[in-house]
Image (cartoon, helix red, strand yellow):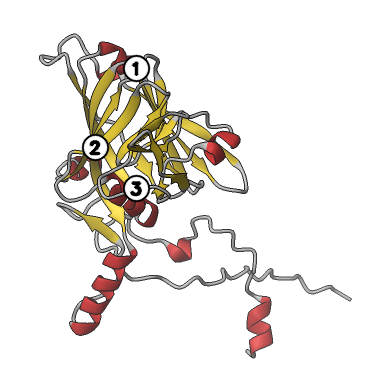
Amino acid sequence: MDFNEIEQQLTDNFNGNQDPYLEMDAYDGDGDLYLDFDGPQNLNPSELEKSRKRFGITINNATTSQKTVAISPAAYRELLASLVYDDSGTLKYKVTGGGTVTAPTGKVADDIMMLYSDVAEINEAGHEIDALIDDGVIYNDGTNSITITSKSKTGRVRHFLNWLKANPTHFIGMHIVCSNSAMFENELTIQKCNPFKKYEEVRIPLQDDNKPSNNNTAKIIVAKEFQMDGESIAKLVIPASTSVEITFVAGVTESAATGLKNKVTAAANKNTALVPVKPIVKKPVPIKKTTPVKR
């Protein structure tokens, strides 16, 4: 049988659906070169719960109205240039919200402050936020500010945001501490954003975890899974005159850096097998038998 005869018996309509020729063991993440775990190498929720990856921030909304703050900006523009100027002997610069704040020590008049809190493009896309998280003052209405500080000893807020863009991360929940119970009536909303289509929002209500049985009425543990990455915008409403501490609990990260490291290790140790990938083959088309025509 020559090549043309073989080709006639194969189909080219493979559409990615499960094929008996391509059956594989159930995927659980174990051995995946690009997944970075902190604990058991398994995507099972009960195993991810053992992760110790934490990143915490404190959001202080000192304004007199509730504000919607973007926790993750997707791929929208964030950069905002603000001129440092001398206001009667005090160096100031303008921030989101229209108000001005005192410039950091070391700045001089006519310096340019490069901020990462521009909300214009995000709002133009219809997401309706007041502020975008970053280190320090992110919003001022002319009287009061919203400020963000990192609770982590290993990274600032900007580091966290840049890292999420490069490393999509699956979170298994978050801890929220707030003395204002109105905070727990809100929800975390996450929406995938790209230039090609609009996706539905994923809503994670906080009130489901604000139970009467909680011993600490100022803290809730949101045990719900969600993902943040460079394609998603995440938003949270912060009540007026409220300070809230949020600790994100990461389960697993997809990391190109981890993948490269694992590949180099596998190459150095010849007995280390990479994740097997079965080839895609064309499924044979059954050959129909024909009944000879009697003459």
| Label 3 Cα crowd, 10 Å radius (few <14 / some 14-19 / many 20+) | many
> Given the current orientation, which residue lies at the most extreme bottom position?
2
Can residue 184 be seen here? The reply is: yes
Q: Cβ–Cβ below 8 Å for labels 3 and 1?
A: no
Nearest to N terminus: mark 2 or mark 3: 2
Q: Name the residue tied to disc 2.
A: 149
Q: Name the residue tied to disc 3.
A: 161
Nearest to N terminus: mark 3 or mark 1: 3
Q: Amino acid at mark 1?
A: Pro
Q: Residue 255 in the image: state x and y as whole percent.
A: 31, 60
Between residues 54 and 139, which one lies in front from this camera angle?
Answer: 139
Q: Nearer the viewer, mark 1 or mark 2?
A: 2
| Label 1 Cα crowd, 10 Å radius (few <14 / some 14-19 / many 20+) | many
Q: Where is the N terminus found, in terms of image quarters?
A: bottom right
Q: Amino acid at mark 2?
A: Thr
Q: Residue at x 60, y 48 (%)?
A: 195
Q: Residue 265 in the image: state x and y as whole percent.
A: 21, 77
Residue 24 is marked as none
| Label 2 Cα crowd, 10 Å radius (few <14 / some 14-19 / many 20+) | some
Q: What is the secondary structure assignment of the residue under circle 2?
A: strand
Q: Residue at x 18, y 45 (%)?
A: 47
Q: Nearer the viewer, mark 2 or mark 3?
A: 2
Q: Residue 288 in the image: state x and y as whole percent.
A: 69, 68
Q: Residue at x 63, y 82 (%)?
A: 6
Vertical comparison of 241 with 97: above or below:
above
> Given the current orientation, which residue lies at the most extreme left position?
215
Q: Residue at x 54, y 37 (%)?
A: 120
Q: What's the CA distance linking mark 1 and mark 2?
A: 17 Å
Vertical comparison of 149 with 162: above or below:
above
Q: Name the residue tied to disc 1.
A: 239
Between residues 102 and 214, which one lies in front from this camera angle?
Answer: 102
